């Protein structure tokens, strides 16, 4: 496996996972990974669809998370390198809170993600009601532009076309060209601010038969001069760690990438594919 670093992982410190951190680590070791970066969710002012789901918190207890990670990092020091990351759900109106949080600990890696689009999560069907998927996706990309203009303390932008996972038609009628003006603006802003993107293989598990973002967006990122690209499975279960990494490697090579990126102490390092 050419890719041996999984830089998007969740354990039971994220509100949508029940996986024990040690079980995730043992799975990564068994699969031949050399690096794992846990990127637990922290979504300030997250909007739940109904009262039952309010029982799930996307606010991260960083101290508890860091204590267990440090303990397991020492335990498995000779088998795998474990990194301290976080996935921040960004929104313009919480930019000050995000900045305080990002500065609160010495993270190895920060993913910025848009889980909410103008106060609605595309995970829920209500986001798509009364309009076409393409109209919904267009609003989603518009919101990302607003997000990344407001907040800058992160390393890569996660699963850039996340909304496509949940559309009524998913990606069967979706293409980069339909939203090229907005996507190009996003990519240019990321490159200008020295931010990367990730190839998130969770899209394959979501029924897209493609990563997030789609291959054409990754191609366009490279055409515009983008070089920083991490790879993450977005695993919330041990069995999904390193999911479809062979496909991810083939995609990157086919687009002319010779390297992928890992982080430690917020500093990128290029690793040969």
Image (tube, helix red, strand yellow):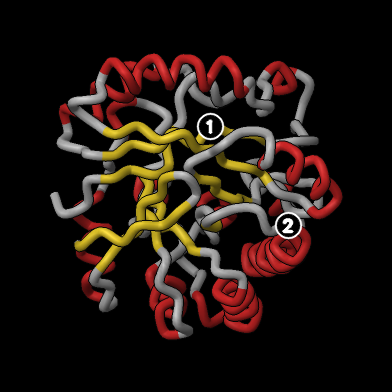
| Nearer to the camera, 104 or 185 | 104
Percent position of residue 161, x then y: 54, 60
Quadrant location of residue 243? Answer: top left
- Circles 1 and 2 in contact, beta carbons < 8 Å: no
Q: Residue at x 70, y 22 (%)?
A: 53
**Viewer can see residue 179:** no
Percent position of residue 123, x then y: 62, 43
Q: Residue at x 28, y 45 (%)?
A: 5
Q: Residues within 10 Å of mark 1 (few under 14, many from 20)?
A: many
On screen, residue 80 versus residue 162, left or right, reads left
**Viewer can see residue 262:** yes
Quadrant location of residue 172? Answer: bottom left
SS at mark 2 in the image: loop
Q: CA distance from mark 1 to mark 2?
A: 19 Å
| Nearer to the camera, 175 or 233 | 233
Query: What is the number of the mark on residue 40?
Result: 1
Q: Quadrant of the C terminus?
A: bottom left
SS at mark 1 in the image: strand
Query: What is the number of the mark on residue 151?
Result: 2
On screen, residue 45 versus residue 80, left or right, reads right
Q: Residues within 10 Å of mark 2 (few under 14, many from 20)?
A: some
Query: With respect to residue 266, does 234 lie above or below?
Result: above
How many marks the image carries: the answer is 2
Query: What is the number of the mark on residue 208?
Result: none
Nearer the N terminus, badge 1 or badge 2? 1
Query: With respect to residue 182, does 165 lie above or below?
Result: above
Q: Residue at x 68, y 22 (%)?
A: 57
Q: Residue at x 52, y 57 (%)?
A: 156
Percent position of residue 247, x then y: 23, 57
Query: With respect to residue 211, does 252 lie above or below?
Result: below
Residue at far right of view: 93
Label 1 or label 2, whichever lies nearer to me, is: 2
């Amino acid at each position: 496996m050419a890719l041996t670093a999984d830089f998007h992982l969740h354990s039971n410190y994220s509100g949508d996972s029940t996986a024990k951190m040690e079980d995730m680590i043992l799975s990564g070791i068994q699969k031949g990974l050399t690096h794992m970066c846990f990127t637990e969710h922290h979504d300030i002012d997250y909007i739940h669809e109904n009262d039952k789901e309010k029982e799930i918190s996307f606010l991260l207890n960083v101290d508890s998370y860091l204590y267990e990670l440090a303990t397991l990092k020492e335990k498995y020091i000779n088998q795998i390198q474990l990194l301290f990351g976080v996935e921040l759900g960004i929104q313009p109106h919480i930019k000050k809170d995000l900045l305080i949080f990002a500065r609160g600990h010495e993270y190895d890696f920060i993913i910025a993600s848009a889980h909410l689009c103008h106060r609605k999560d595309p995970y829920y069907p209500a986001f798509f009601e009364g309009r076409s998927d393409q109209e919904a996706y267009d609003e989603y990309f518009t919101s990302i532009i607003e997000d990344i203009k407001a907040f800058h303390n992160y390393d890569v932008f996660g699963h850039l076309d996340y909304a496509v996972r949940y559309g009524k038609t998913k990606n069967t009628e979706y293409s980069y060209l339909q939203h090229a003006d907005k996507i190009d603006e996003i990519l240019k802003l990321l490159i200008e601010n020295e931010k990367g993107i990730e190839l998130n293989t969770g899209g394959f598990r979501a029924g897209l038969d493609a990563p997030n973002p789609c291959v054409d967006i990754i191609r366009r990122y490279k055409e515009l001069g983008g070089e920083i690209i991490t790879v993450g499975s977005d695993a919330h279960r041990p069995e999904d760690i390193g999911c479809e990494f062979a496909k991810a490697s083939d995609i990157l090579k086919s687009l002319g990438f010779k390297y992928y990126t890992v982080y430690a102490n917020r500093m990128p390092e290029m690793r040969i594919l």
